[in-house]
Image: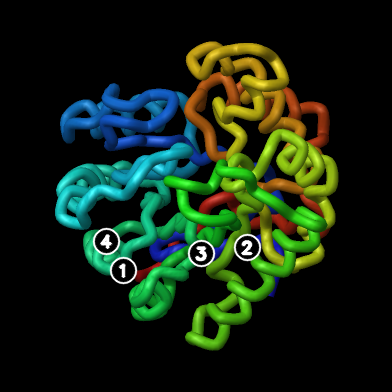
Amino acid sequence: MSTYLWQTARFTLDLASRPLVMGIVNVTPDSFSDGGRHSDEAAACLHAERLLAQGTDILDIGGESTRPGSRPPPVEIELARVLPVVRHAVTLGVPVSVDTSRPEVIAEVLDAGADIINDVRALQYPGALAAAAAHPRAGLCLMHMQGEPATMQVAPHYDDVLAQVAAFLAERMAVAASAGIAAERIVLDPGYGFGKTLDHNLMLFRRQRELTALGRPLLAGWSRKGTLGQVTGRPAGERMVPSVAAALAAVAMGARVVRVHDVADTVDALKVWNAAGLGDAPGRDNNETQRRTDP
């Protein structure tokens, strides 16, 4: 098994050849940076097509805002938001990820052809692990979060943020393995901004490369996050440059997927990065970045 291959439902992604861009499609009225802009089916489908034209490698569709202080919508509403967009996105020829934690949504979107489940709760909801395991080729992203979005920024505490994040991700991988989920289906996300202060985020960022010792690729989601606002003084709508800088820094420290709002700008920055010979992961092979596989 290669550390740099990510098995998803329809594609085997080679994360050694270059870091990949995951473009965000928020089908929500209340996301922190673009809430409401793509909250109806037509706007969300058009946005997915726009991100594809800008060069995204993966589309990530979400129907639940997980901004600090948010509460999840009823499952019926989440499904009504994401399912029509997923059905369109799977016709576009790139891997489709769905940002969800609920087993009902996991089952429905995978049945509809989605390739990846991106779960900020790392399959901890009752039934989520079984729903993911029932689709033996689906890719998974397991993220660390302290608490729940509604309360996660109320005095988060760690004795050693890196050690605790690493231990949590290792434990969730072990649980997934016990359910029959192969390691090559998994990437890991340290969860920047999810139950972490400015100091926690920056300490974790500086030591991010140490998380590669867990043996699976890392996904980093810095796009427009509050920490970037604290560092620069910029509101969410003016954080494109800080977001691109954070994406490049994350790649420099071992991330193989970056989850972003500003796809075109991030793609351009990574083209320069790759042209300078900085994009390859250790132990790369000559596989294509995306190899379609039989379902």
Q: Position of residue 280 (x, y in %)?
A: 77, 45
Q: Which residue is mark 4?
A: 105
In the rendered image, the vertical position of residue 210 relative to residue 49, given as above or below:
below
Callout 1 touching callout 4 (CB < 8 Å): yes
Picture coordinates of residue 146 (x, y %)? 58, 55
Find out whether the residues at labels 4 and 3 contact each other: C-beta distance under 8 Å.
Answer: no
User: Does 161 sit above or below residue 220?
Assistant: below
Residue receiving disc 2: 5
- In space, the residues marked 2 and 4 are separated at their CA atoms by 26 Å
Mark 3 is surrounded, within 10 Å at the Cα level, by few (under 14), some (14 to 19) or many (20 or more) other residues, namely many
For the rendered model, the colour scheme is rainbow
Q: Quadrant of residue 201?
A: top right
Tell me where residue 278 appears, x and y as whole percent. 81, 36
Kindly report the distance in space between the C-alpha atoms of the residues bearing marks 1 and 2: 25 Å
- The Cα–Cα distance between marks 4 and 3, rounded to whole angstroms, is 14 Å
Image point 62% across, 24% down: which residue? 243
Query: How packed is label 2: few (under 14 Cα within 10 Å), some, or many (20 or more)?
Result: many
Q: Is residue 263 left or right of residue 80?
A: right
Question: Could you tell me which secondary element the residue under label 4 belongs to?
Answer: helix
Residue that carries the numbered disc 3 in the rendered image: 122
Regarding residue 20, the answer to whether it shows in the image is no
- Dot 2 or dot 4, earlier in sequence: 2
Label 3 sits on what residue type? Ala
User: Which residue occupies 29% across, 22% down?
Assistant: 37
Residue at horizontal 55 percent and vertical 61 percent from the top: 142
